[in-house]
Image (spheres, coloured by chain):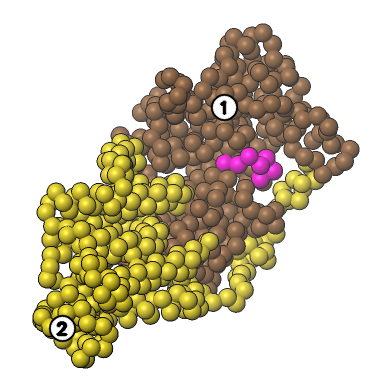
Amino acid sequence: MDPLAPAPRDRGGPGGPLLIACDLKKHFPVRSSGGKSVQAVDGISFSVREGETLGIVGESGCGKSTLARLLLHLIVPDAGELVFDGTTVRDDITVGALRRQVQIVFQDSYSSLNPRMPIRDTVAFGPFVQGKPKGEARRIARDTLARVGLDPDLFGPRYPHELSGGQKQRVNIARALATGPRMVILDEPVSALDKSIEAQVLNLLRALKRQLNLTYVFISHDLNVVRYLSDRVLVMYLGRVVELGRVEAIYTRPAHPYTRALLASQPSMNPVRRIEEPPITGDPPNPIAPPAGCRFHTRCPFAEPVCMTVDPPLPPWLGPQSHIAACHLSDRLPRRISHE
Amino acid sequence: MAEINELIVSEPPPLADRAGVGAKQTPPPTRVRGYWRSVGFRLRHDPATLAFAAIVLLIVLAALLAPALAPFDPYKESIIGRLKPFGWRGHLLGTDELGRDMLSRLLYGGRVSLLMGVLPVLIATLIGGLLGVVAGFLGGRTNTAIMRMMDVFYAFPSVLLAVAIAGAMGGGMANGMLALSLVFIPPMCRVAETATTQVRALDFIEAARASGAGTLTIIRYHVLGNVLGPVLIYASSLVSVSVLLASGLSFLGLGVRPPVPDWGLMLSTLRQSIYVVPYVCALPGAAIFVTSICFNLVSDGLRSAMDVRM
C-alpha cells in the first residue's frame, strides 16, 4: 500500500514513502491587488516512494517550480507539511538535515553556476559547507565529476563560460550529487538543451539513478521526456493536482480533460495526425482569482454546469495501481485517446 | 508523437557506449583561464591603458619619492626669489609667490593630493560596498532602510555636499578626507547594491542555499567575487573625482591649510599672480588635470577589460 495521507503519526519509515507532501500551500501576496495573492501552489498532496521517479507536468506558470522549491524549503510553505523518510521536516528534522538528503538541479544551467568559480570549487562547495574538510570535499568533487562523464583534470579548473550547455548541466548534476543525497529534484533539467544533448543527459540521469539508488522528482513541461523517465506522473493545473497515476495509464488512458488536451497538443511527427486547431486555447486563468468550481472549466471542452460551481476533489490515492483525477466527468469521458 | 516516443522511449543502449556516461568528452584545446587572468590578459594587450597606467605610476612614484627627488626645501621662502620663471637660479619650474621652489612643492603636493584622492575612495569602498552588499542581499526592509538613507545624500550635488560637510566640521586635511568619504559612500553603496541584487536572483545562490550554506557563507563565496568587478571599476573612476574635489576643497580653504603644499591650495594662492608668471601659475592645475584624466582613462580601460560577457 502506498497511502497518500494516513493519520499524521503513522506514515513513512522503512518500507513507506520517502517523501510525503501533505496539503502544501504557497500564496504570493500581490501588493497592487489589495490583499489578494497568487495561488502558486494551492493544497498539493502526494508521496514519492523510495527509488521511483515521479514526473510532474503542467503548463508554464502552474506552480511546478514553486513546488520544487517548497520541497526543499527554499521557499517556506504557508501551510502543509513535508515528511521525509518518516520524519516531519521542521518538527523532527531540521531544514538543514533535509537538505543533506534532498538536492535540486535547476533548469537554467547558465545561471545556476557561479561564473567566478571554477567547476571543481562549485562541485566541492556542497560537501564543504556540510562540514567536510577542504581536501575531502575536493576529492568528492573529482569523483562526482568523473561520475557525470566530465574528466576532472580537464574540466575541474574551468569556468562555466568555457563549457557547453550540456556540460554545464552535467556540472549542475554533479553539484547536486556531491553531497550524497537520497533524493534529487530535477526542475526542468533538460528544457534548455538541444535534443541530442537532452538524450545524453537523460541517459545520464537514468544511469545515475540506478548506480546511486536515487529517487527523482522530475519536473518538466515536455511530455515525452517525462514519459521516458518517470514511473508515475502528476499533472498540475493552476497550483493543484488534477491527475496522478502510473505513467502508462496517464499516457494511454488520461482521465482528466486537461491531461488529454496536453497530450493532444504535442506536435506529431506523423503528417496524418497533425492537427490544425490547438486542442486547448487561451491562457490559463489568472491565478490571483482562479475560476469558481473546477479551475479548468473555462477551457474545458466537456464542461457541464456542475463544473462551474462545484470544485471537484481529488480522490484518495489507494495503491500503486491507482489512477486518480480531479474531474466530475472522468468516468464518462472516452478513456482511450485516439492517436495512440 | 508515437514516433518521437519511439526515438526516445526505446530502452537506452548500454550506457558506456553512449557519449553520455562512459565516454569522456574531449573539449576543444582552449587555454583554461580564470576571470581575473583573462582580465589581466586583456589589459596587457591594451597599449593605451598601459601607457596611462604608467603615467599614473610615475606620478605616484614621484610623490612617494618626493624627499629624494625634490631639489629644494618646499617650505624655504625667499624675498628676492618670488614669482621667478622656469629655470631661474636652478629652480627648474620657477618659484611661487613666497619664493618657494615650485618643483619641490609640486612633488610634495602630489603626496597630499594623491592621499586625498585615494584614501576617501578606499574608505567609501569599504563602508559603502559593505552596506550595499548587505542591502542587496537581504532585500526587503533592510534594503529600503539603507537605500533611502543613501537617497538623502543624493539630494545634494556632491561638490556642495563635500563643501558643506567640510565647512561644518572645520577645515583641515582629516576633515576634508572625512567629508569626501561621506560624499562617496552613497554612490558606492548603490553600485554594490545593484550588483548584489542582480547576483542574488541567480539560481546558483539558491543552489548554494540548497547545499545547506548560510547567508554569510553564501556572501563570502558566491556574492563578493561577483560584486568586486563593478565595485572596483567604480572605485577607480572615483579616484579622479576625489583628486578634483580634494583640490577644490583646498582651493576654497576647506582642505589642507597653508603652508602645506597641495595642488588645489597652490592653484588658489597662485591665481592672483597669473599675469606675472602665467606658466608657473598653471603648473598645479596641469598636475591636477593630468592626474585626474589619467586615473579616468585607466579606469575606462579597466572597465572594458573587465566587461567579459560570460
Residues at marks 1 and 2, CA–CA distance in whole angstroms: 89 Å
Residue B232 vs residue B106, the one in the foreground: B106
Horizontal arrangement in the rendering, residue A29 relative to residue B86 (left or right): right
Quarter holding the C terminus of chain A? Answer: top right
Q: Colour of chain B?
A: yellow
Q: Is residue B179 above or below residue A226?
A: below
Q: Residue at x 67, y 40 (%)?
A: A223
Note whether residue B71 is visible.
Answer: yes
Residue A321 vs residue B218, the one in the foreground: B218
In the rendering, at what x and y percent does residue A165 appear?
Answer: 60, 58
Q: Nearer the viewer, mark 1 or mark 2?
A: 2
Q: Is residue B25 above or below residue A36?
A: below
Q: In the rendered image, which residue does mark 1 sit on? A: A238
Q: Where are the magenta residues, as a range?
A: A219-225
Amino acid residing under circle 1? Leu
How many marks overall? 2
State whether discs 1 and 2 lie on one chain. Answer: no
Judged from this view, the residue extending furthest toward the bottom is B90
Horizontal arrangement in the rendering, residue A323 relative to residue A8 (left or right): right
Secondary structure found at label 2: loop
Q: Residue at x 37, y 62 (%)?
A: B237
In the rendering, at what x and y percent does residue B146 appear?
Answer: 28, 42
The brown chain is A
Horizontal arrangement in the rendering, residue A228 relative to residue B118 (left or right): right
Q: Residues within 10 Å of mark 1 (few under 14, many from 20)?
A: many
In the rendering, at what x and y percent does residue B297 appear?
Answer: 42, 69
Query: Where, by quadrant of the figure, is residue B123 drawn?
Result: bottom left
Q: Residues within 10 Å of mark 2 (few under 14, many from 20)?
A: some
Amino acid residing under circle 2? Gly
Q: Residue at x 49, y 36 (%)?
A: A66
